[in-house]
Image: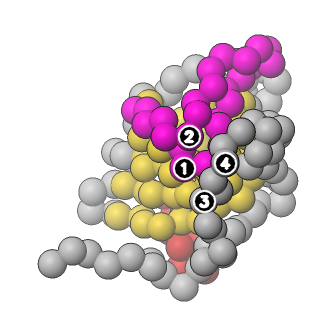
Amino acid sequence: MSTHKFDDKNITWHKLDWLPDLEFYVYKVDEENRIIDILFKFAANSKVQLHRHKAPYITFVIQGELRFYRPDGELKEIRPTGSYVSGVANGEPHVEGGGDEDAIVFFSNREVEGPLYEFLDENLQPTVTLGFDDFKAQLEEQGGPKWQSAA
């Protein structure tokens, strides 16, 4: 367990009703470069619904550890604080969740063209997709970007 926690008091976390153990904050939706940057908070000892990433991505674990499980529930990987990983589009379906404390993870999704996340049922059939327009709408609901471009 980490001894220092990321101070997230200035982040207004958002939730989706059907993903109770996940909170998120959209930082950037760049239509021109097809990039979506999101901060996720995975509740401690939780598992988020089975899904597949539909675009390449980069993750950086800021707090806790991010745990990955195969569709059958087997633990596949643990990414501790400080882990930086590049992932590919259409990889193995998986479940993600926090370890013994909430995991806070930055995701930078690249080359987003269609769905970004595809949530699956037990037969690996898509049930819900989230894409560019969903995160753009969320960013607008949050009041727009809270970042500035460097001059």
112 on left or right of 11 = left
> Is residue 122 shown to the viewer in this render?
yes
Mark 2 and mark 3: Cα distance apart in space:
10 Å
Q: Secondary structure at mark 4?
A: loop
The residue where tag 2 is placed is 81
Q: Secondary structure at mark 1?
A: strand
> Is residue 127 shown to the viewer in this render?
no
The residue where tag 1 is placed is 62
Q: Nearer the viewer, residue 6 or 39?
A: 6
The first of marks 4 and 1 along the sequence is 4
The residue where tag 3 is placed is 6
Crowding near pointer 2: few (<14 within 10 Å), some, many (20+)? some
Mark 2 and mark 1: Cα distance apart in space:
6 Å
Mark 3 and mark 4: Cα distance apart in space:
10 Å
Q: Are marks 2 and 1 in contact (CB under 8 Å)?
A: yes
Q: Are marks 1 and 3 in contact (CB under 8 Å)?
A: yes
Q: Residue at x 65, y 56 (%)?
A: 5
Instruction: Name the amino acid, label 2.
Output: Thr
Q: Residue at x 38, y 76 (%)?
A: 147
Question: Which numbered tag is attached to residue 122?
Answer: none
The residue where tag 4 is placed is 3
Instruction: Name the amino acid, label 3.
Output: Phe
